[in-house]
Image: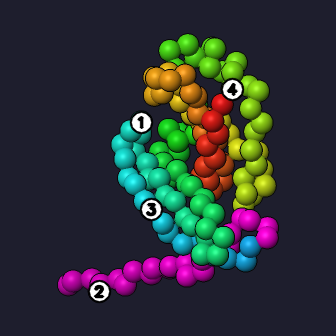
Amino acid sequence: MVPPRRSRLIHKQQLAAECPNPNCEGHLTADTMLITDWPYIHADIDLKCSLCQKTVKYGIPLDNLAGSNLQIYHSKPGKALKRVSAVAVPECPFHHKPMVLTKIFGDKVYSNGDMRVQFKCGDCYCLEHITV
């Protein structure tokens, strides 16, 4: 006897996210998406507001631990951490909690002495990039 086929229940969220800009009533729509395996498998997604054109970035990792660890791309990690310690920690525009420092891009990425840091929300994976 063959068991009956089960139908799958699929739930799709149809509501668009609201723009985090307090002076805007627009909604975020997908702008770009990139799936990459460097430095770990993840998707970078940019959402853009339909009214004010503000872009919100997300970095969604396949593995949560890989996505939330601090990764330093600098030949002198101690010096990089000291330089980054003066940066104010941004707040997630959606959860209003402090974001976590996840990446420091230093002289192994930029040869002109620039340094960028990436902060990520632990709840929604929203990203903030700051040049130091």
Q: On residue 32, which mark appears?
A: 3
Q: Are marks 1 and 4 in contact (CB under 8 Å)?
A: no
Q: Is residue 49 above or below residue 5?
A: above
- Residue 79 is inside the magenta segment: no
Q: Residue at x 66, y 53 (%)?
A: 123
The answer to whether one can see residue 83 in this image is yes
Crowd band around label 2 with a 10 angstrom C-alpha radius: few (<14), some (14–19), many (20+): few
Which numbered tag is attached to residue 39?
1
Mark with earlier residue (1, 4): 1
Q: Nearer the viewer, mark 1 or mark 4?
A: 4
Report the amino acid beneath label 2: Pro
Which amino acid type is shown beneath numbered disc 4? Val
Mark before the other along the chain sequence, 2 or 4: 2
Does the magenta segment cover residue 7? yes
**On the image, numbered disc 2 is attached to which residue?**
4
- Do the numbered discs 1 and 3 sit on residues whose CB atoms are within 8 Å? no
Q: Which residues are magenta?
A: 1-23
Decide: few, some or many residues near mark 3? Use Cα within 10 Å; few <14, some 14-19, many ≥20: few
Q: Quadrant of the C terminus?
A: top right
Please, is residue 34 above or below residue 8 in the view? Answer: above
- Distance in Å between CA atoms under marks 3 and 2: 41 Å
Q: Is residue 4 left or right of residue 82?
A: left
Left or right of 42? Residue 70 is right
Label annotation for residue 84: 4
Q: Return the residue found at the far left.
A: 1
Please state which amino acid type lies under the numbered disc 3: Thr
Element at label 2: loop
Could you tell me residue 67's position as x and y percent?
Answer: 52, 42
